[in-house]
């Protein structure tokens, strides 16, 4: 953030808490930015002449005579085509030693799209991962998170998805990324030679947590520039939204707000919705698709963060360690893409819907057979075939290291059906059986 | 003279205003931010200070910004042109807004002031009239839209003049009414009404005495909702709340449907915008959009307006009810509205109730549900507002304040069960936990016995009992194993499965199965119970499973076939043969 002329400067603080400072000041507007002893802060409360500012990097060591300089505007980002290929911090300042970006200055966290002007999402986004393309197809303009435990390779999966997806721009919003993960993303993007279509806003774990609150709005302001002004297809990656929510929790706590479920602020739903609802299919062809990561505590989806997320997003992708095959898979039971029916069988082959459902149903039969086995009951011939099928289905289709086209996924599924089951056992429509059945 | 004030404090969208002059609770005001007028509502007054919740983002607002109070509460504009429109929570017309983004401070008129309507008078000069009496009508598409004496008129009036049949705009004078002190009042086709006040003007609100058909079997057959009744659908995410609500919106036997999308996904509203102008209303053959009004305040739109949106929707419903219409209000989701209340209560530093919700949450919800109902109008006709809301309980746990408060207020409960959704048994309405209090109403029982079947309620209760017993034995079978229980247990289990597959489960995406008229529901329930009453003899439990699976398959095919068509009768023949052979 650069200094400007006509700034108002104060040097007398009235109060200091862990995250906020208060002072008497005139002509201050709500949401305005300022620096307090050189640290960035934002106006969060005005009561008469008393103004309270939230200091993003914390208030450690701030003296009562700290210099407070008001900027006269809310957080903003300079947008232009020069954003492409650059890395920024939470304030939108370059961290790649490049020059500052010139361009139109836009306030972040801008207004919503008129719902009446939106278009229904309709473009399939292929990723090569069958657990997604076959079972939970992504559509442009969709918002969907990965639900994953912290030890799962969600950032790797997300980087893969992003690099394979057919989009014009990829915008990474990294919140509380470990420095290793930040470097991983940077290296993946560089080695894919895709750097010119990637823009990153990153807050790493060694930076103050409250700064993270700016990341999604920065990333989405850049996304809106490319999607609305340039009619481009933009994919936004947000990782990790649980750490974002934790930062919200810290702030509300220091503002003495009454916590609701799981000590989260009562406005958590609205706060998350404001971010996710930026996903949109625009009338002029541009779109914003959001893929996020919500880390779970031991798979618990009833916690306020995943729970509120689930009510907002259009489905969720569950990562699970499959102990039978040792692979990380996309769980076909708990994952869901609410928009998949908009493209399945329309932009993919006619047998997609039936093949998808049959494959999952047979996988469910395998799960039942496994329970029977564990409880000591005898297994039938069908049960045994199901178990063998499940292993192969898991390895060849559900695993996240798969990278094939959707037609290949469908063919693989038919091959498995033919190998382990009779036509009647699959219960697929006769017309499709005749056309696609692969006898073993 | 309007009161004015200046801004003295700001925390998010709660603004403190120092007022010069009078101010009333819930009064609307506009804050001037460099020429942009931000609408706000007074929610608390303390000394000279009014606390107002702003319906827009307060970014850039400063101490010292001027405020003008409007002297009235949040109002909606009522008149011809409401039907088929799409509004935001404050009744701004979304279709006529410029640009792709919603602009702060941009307000559009809900009604078209230039459109010509063909008015036919029904009142005569010299008639004595009261508030909500009909003066005449215009055709709003197919709907005879009554022009009424404004609801705010408090006494008896005499019609002095009434417009002749002809073409008028909504602001033209339709009638002049003289009050008892001899003063004249001009009536146009539009009137305004504060959304938080229920519209009166009817003689009485009797107990509901008829059923409102939805074509959804697990509702109509097992737990019917009454016309003018209230119900709610709680369920965790991914259980099919929205699909069920859309099914009711498409098939519900109502003349006017108002859908309030309150704090939900924008893409779901886009689906309505895209599909409703194309889909056909099964009752009239007209396009669904011709009977639908959408109030849309999606989750990313300002939180304070979310609270207003459900009231706006209800007021529009009451307006059409006063015309003698059968109106259905669907709100998705009332939890988001409760959360909006919580956010405000929190900022005002009120002492919190359970889960930080305001302590009067229960009272607010009851009050709102009480606005539904069937009404007898002064001209002897009836109108009704039936209300079904969804609730999104945190973590899918029904022991939370919004669900519990709603349970006290609504008469029907359609609980969506995660376990059923996981098994893809849709609609995932739990047959055991769900209930309809209306099945206990003597009026409803006799209505059902007269219209549907003379022994209907007993049949329904019998079916419910079979489901309940089925669940009990299923637990036994799970514990003891298939061989560990008598075959009769398996029979009981499969009877409940039969009811589950044939009556409860319904394919919302199949053109025939998705809508089941009451006559067909009666036929199928009677048939299913007949099968349940038939004695079969099985040697092994495998025989039993196989037999019932076959029966389920045949009857499922019936559900997918045209009622009493060739295919349907073919499957019915197969079924009768099996039942006969086993006797």
Image (cartoon, grey):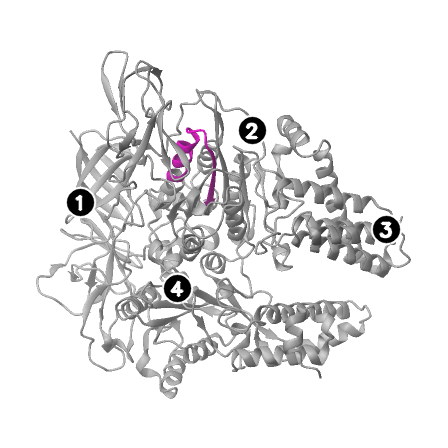
Residue tagged 1: B32
Is label 3 on the same chain as label 4?
A: no
Please indicate whether residue A130 sits to the left or right of residue B333 in the image: right
Residue A109 percent location from the top left of the image:
29, 60
SS for callout 2: loop
CA gap between label 3 and label 4 equals 56 Å
Residue closest to the eye, B50 or A386: A386
Q: Magenta residues?
A: B312-331
Within 10 Å of disc 2 (Cα), the crowding (few <14, some 14-19, many 20+) is many
Q: Which residue is mark 2?
A: B208
Instruction: Report x, y in % for residue B572.
Output: 76, 50
- Chain letter for the residue marked with disc 3 in the picture: B
Q: Quadrant of residue B187?
A: top left
Dots 4 and 2 on the same chain: no
Whole-angstrom CA distance, mark 1 to mark 3, is 76 Å
Residue A218: image location, x then y, percent: 29, 67
Which quadrant would residue B266 be assigned to in this image?
A: bottom left
- Between disc 3 and disc 4, the foreground one is 3
The residue lying at 24 percent from left, 48 percent from top is B106
User: Nearer the viewer's eye, disc 2 or disc 3?
Assistant: 2
Would you say the residues marked 1 and 3 are in contact, meaning their CB atoms lie under 8 Å apart? no
Residue under pointer 4:
A244
Residues at marks 2 and 3, CA–CA distance in whole angstroms: 41 Å
Residue matched to label 3: B488
Figure check: B50 above or below B297: above
- Which numbered disc, 1 or 3, marks the residue that appears first in the sequence? 1
Locate residue A410 relative to residue B456 in the image: left or right: left
Residue at 29% x, 50% y is B12
């Amino acid at each position: 953030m650069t200094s400007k002329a006509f700034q108002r400067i104060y040097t007398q603080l009235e109060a200091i808490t862990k995250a906020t400072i208060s002072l008497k000041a005139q002509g201050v507007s709500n949401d305005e930015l300022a620096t307090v002893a050189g640290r960035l802060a934002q106006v969060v409360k005005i009561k008469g002449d008393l103004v309270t500012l939230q200091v993003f990097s914390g208030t450690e060591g701030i003296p009562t005579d700290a210099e407070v300089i008001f900027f006269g505007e809310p957080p903003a980002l300079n947008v232009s085509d020069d954003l492409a290929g650059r890395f920024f911090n939470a304030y939108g300042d370059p961290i790649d030693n490049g020059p500052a970006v010139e361009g139109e200055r836009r306030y972040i966290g801008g207004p919503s799209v008129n719902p009446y002007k939106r278009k229904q999402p309709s473009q399939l986004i292929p990723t090569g991962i069958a657990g997604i393309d076959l079972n939970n197809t992504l559509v442009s303009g969709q918002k969907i998170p990965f639900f994953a435990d912290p030890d799962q390779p969600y950032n790797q999966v997300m980087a893969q998805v992003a690099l394979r997806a057919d989009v014009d721009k990829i915008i990474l919003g990294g919140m509380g990324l470990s420095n290793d993960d930040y470097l991983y993303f940077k290296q993946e993007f560089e080695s894919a030679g895709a750097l010119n279509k990637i823009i990153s806003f990153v807050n790493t774990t060694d930076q103050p947590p409250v700064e993270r609150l700016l990341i999604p709005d920065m990333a989405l302001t850049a996304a809106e520039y490319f999607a609305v002004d340039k009619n481009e297809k933009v994919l936004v990656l947000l990782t990790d939204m649980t750490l974002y929510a934790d930062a919200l929790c810290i702030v509300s706590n220091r503002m003495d707000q009454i916590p609701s479920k799981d000590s989260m602020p009562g406005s958590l739903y609205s706060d998350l919705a404001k971010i996710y609802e930026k996903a949109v299919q625009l009338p002029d062809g541009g779109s914003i698709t959001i893929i996020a990561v919500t880390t779970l505590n031991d798979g618990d989806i009833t916690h306020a963060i995943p729970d509120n997320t689930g009510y907002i997003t259009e489905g969720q992708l569950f990562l699970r360690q499959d102990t039978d095959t040792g692979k990380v898979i996309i769980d076909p039971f708990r994952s869901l893409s609410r928009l998949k029916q908009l493209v399945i069988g329309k932009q993919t082959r006619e047998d997609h819907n039936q093949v998808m459902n049959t494959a999952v149903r047979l996988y469910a039969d395998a799960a039942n057979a496994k329970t029977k086995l564990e409880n000591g009951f005898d297994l039938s011939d069908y049960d045994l075939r199901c178990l063998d099928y499940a292993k192969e289905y898991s390895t060849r289709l559900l695993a996240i290291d798969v990278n094939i086209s959707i037609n290949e996924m469908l063919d693989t599924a038919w091959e498995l059906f033919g190998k382990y089951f009779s036509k009647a056992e699959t219960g697929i429509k006769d017309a499709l059986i005749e056309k696609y059945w692969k006898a073993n | 003279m309007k009161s004015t004030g200046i801004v003295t404090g700001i925390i998010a969208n709660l603004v403190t205003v120092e007022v010069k002059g009078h101010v009333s609770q819930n009064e609307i005001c506009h804050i001037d931010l460099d020429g942009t007028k931000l609408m706000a509502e007074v929610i608390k007054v303390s000394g000279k200070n009014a606390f107002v919740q702003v319906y827009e983002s307060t970014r850039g607002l400063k101490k010292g910004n001027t405020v003008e109070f409007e002297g009235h509460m949040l109002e909606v504009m009522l008149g011809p042109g409401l039907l088929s429109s799409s509004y935001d929570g404050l009744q701004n017309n979304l279709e006529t807004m410029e640009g792709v983004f919603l602009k702060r401070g941009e307000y559009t008129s809900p009604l078209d002031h230039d459109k010509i309507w063909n008015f036919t008078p029904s009142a005569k000069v010299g008639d004595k009239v009261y508030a909500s009496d009909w003066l005449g009508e215009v055709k709003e598409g197919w709907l005879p839209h009554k022009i009424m004496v404004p609801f705010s008129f408090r006494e008896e009036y005499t019609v002095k003049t009434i417009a002749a049949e002809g073409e008028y705009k909504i602001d033209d004078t339709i009638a002049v009414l003289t009050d008892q002190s001899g003063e004249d009042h001009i009536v146009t086709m539009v009137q305004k009404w504060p959304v938080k006040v229920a519209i009166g003007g009817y003689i009485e609100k009797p107990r509901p005495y008829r059923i409102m058909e939805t074509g959804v079997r697990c509702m109509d057959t097992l737990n019917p909702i009454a016309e003018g009744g209230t119900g709610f659908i709680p369920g965790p995410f991914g259980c099919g709340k929205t699909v069920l609500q859309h099914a009711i919106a498409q098939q519900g036997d109502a003349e006017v449907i108002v859908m309030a999308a309150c704090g939900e996904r924008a893409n779901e509203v886009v689906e309505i915008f895209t599909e409703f102008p194309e889909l056909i209303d099964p009752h009239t053959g007209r396009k669904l959009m011709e009977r639908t009004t959408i109030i849309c305040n999606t989750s990313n739109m300002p939180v304070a307006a979310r609270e207003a949106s459900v009231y706006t929707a209800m007021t529009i419903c009451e307006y059409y009810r006063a015309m003698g219409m059968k109106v259905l209000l669907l709100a998705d989701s009332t939890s988001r509205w409760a959360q909006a209340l919580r956010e405000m209560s929190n900022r005002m530093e009120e002492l919190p109730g359970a889960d930080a919700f305001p302590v009067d949450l229960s009272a607010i919800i009851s009050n709102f549900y009480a606005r539904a109902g069937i009404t007898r109008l002064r001209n002897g006709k009836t109108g009704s507002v039936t209300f079904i809301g969804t609730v999104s309980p945190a973590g899918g746990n029904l022991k939370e304040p919004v669900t519990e408060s709603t349970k006290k207020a609504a008469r029907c409960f359609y609980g969506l069960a995660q376990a059923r959704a996981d098994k893809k048994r849709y609609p995932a309405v739990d047959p055991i936990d769900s209930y309809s209090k209306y099945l206990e109403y003597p009026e409803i029982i006799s209505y059902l016995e007269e219209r549907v079947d003379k022994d209907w309620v007993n049949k329904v209760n019998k079916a419910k009992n079979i489901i309940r017993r089925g669940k009990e034995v299923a637990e036994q079978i799970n514990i003891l194993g298939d061989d560990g229980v008598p075959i009769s247990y398996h029979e009981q289990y499969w009877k409940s499965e039969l009811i589950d597959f044939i009556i409860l489960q319904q394919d919302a995406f199949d053109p025939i199965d998705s809508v089941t008229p009451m006559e067909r529901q009666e036929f199928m329930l009677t048939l299913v119970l007949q099968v349940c009453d038939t004695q079969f003899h099985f040697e092994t439990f495998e025989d039993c499973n196989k037999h019932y699976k076959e029966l389920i398959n045949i009857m499922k095919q019936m559900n997918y076939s045209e009622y009493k068509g060739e295919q349907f009768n073919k499957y019915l023949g197969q079924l009768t043969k099996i039942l006969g052979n086993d006797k």
